Amino acid sequence: MKIMRIGPAGAERPAALVRDDQYVDLSDVVEDFDETFFGSGGLDRIEAIVADRAAAGQALSLEGKRIGSPIARPHQIICVGLNYADHAAESGLPVPDEPILFTKSPNTLVGPYDDVRIPRGSTKPDWEVELGIVIGKRTSYLESVDDARKHIAGWVLVNDVSERAFQMERGGQWLKGKSAETFNPAGPWLVTDDEIDDVRDLGMWLDVNGVRRQTGSTSTMIFDPYFLVHYISQFMILEPGDLINTGTPPGVGLGFTPPIWLQPGDEVTLGIDGLGTQRQTVVAPR
Ligand code: ZN
């Protein structure tokens, strides 16, 4: 199943994709794709409803509709740093022994085709295509990596937009470089695990103005998604609907010599096999 949210920013309605360009509305049976929904077995509850509505010819066209983030604003967004060995190398940093974790403000979430706004005072805005994990149920002190499977609602494409000067030259933690408004495009869908053969073998790419900048595969992750959920659960409680950005492959702007930073008017397109594609226009600070 592919679930999504459709409508104006802040007033999206829950829906499910039933064909390439068609969806069924679920706003009469689901409040939102939020903590309550995931935590109460919502995905299981809607499966038959989606199938029935598609069979009954209730599908609507996506044409001209805004697509929002497929999940409502979560309790937290956790990010994993330097989770691809080749990206660590281009950043000039050693491969970590344990996952590097940092947080990102949850109100950075926007839709997959929304504008990305450069923050005030920014000099080094950058891109990061990533696999996102959406948590399906309350997760604390998992006993084994295998247990993690049962705690994952699904997978989502994200752009972990970053401001490298804020991240690395302004003191302290990475939070400042990751939390500006619009810095977390997500979607177009949340894809449930049964639709993905092996999440540890998905191709991923990102272009800026049509020029390929990132090419990678989740197969070169240092710490795979199941390991990460188990690992993070030893340090904090993950709530249903929480998002984990699992790190980016090589080819970020920081890794070029000289570095390449995003500019107003740039078009960023990105994708991961099976998780759809995104397109953002970069706009100037407000
Ligand atoms: Zn990242």
Image (cartoon, rainbow, N blue to C red):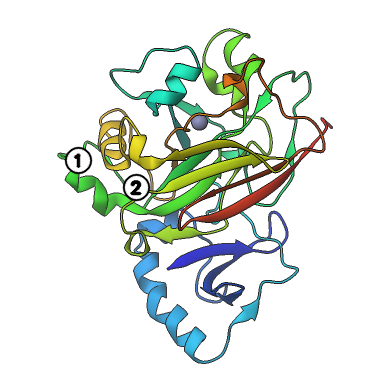
Q: Is mark 1 within 8 Å of ligand 1?
A: no
Q: Quadrant of the C terminus?
A: top right
Tell me the amino acid under the disc marked 1. Answer: Val
Q: Identify the residue at image location x=20%, y=39%.
A: 142
The residue shown at (59%, 62%) is: 5
Residue assigned mark 1:
145
Q: Is residue 106 above or below residue 190?
A: above
> Would you identify the image quadrant in which residue 224 lies?
top left
Q: Is residue 74 visible?
A: no
* Residue at the spot 73% in from the left edge and 60% down from the top edge: 8
Q: Say the numbered circle drawn on residue 201.
A: 2
Badge 1 or badge 2: first in the primary sequence? 1
Q: Nearer the viewer, residue 107 or 279?
A: 279
Label 2 near label 1: C-beta < 8 Å? no
Identify the amino acid type marked 2: Asp
Q: Position of residue 27 (x, y in %)?
A: 57, 72
Provide residue 158's location: percent of width, then percent of height. 54, 44
Residue 240 location, x and y as percent?
39, 50
Q: Secondary structure at mark 2?
A: loop
Residue 170 higher or lower than 113, as above or below:
above
Looking at the image, residue 2 lies above or below residue 211: below
| Residue at the left extreme of this rendering | 143
Of residues 212 and 188, the one nearer the viewer is: 212
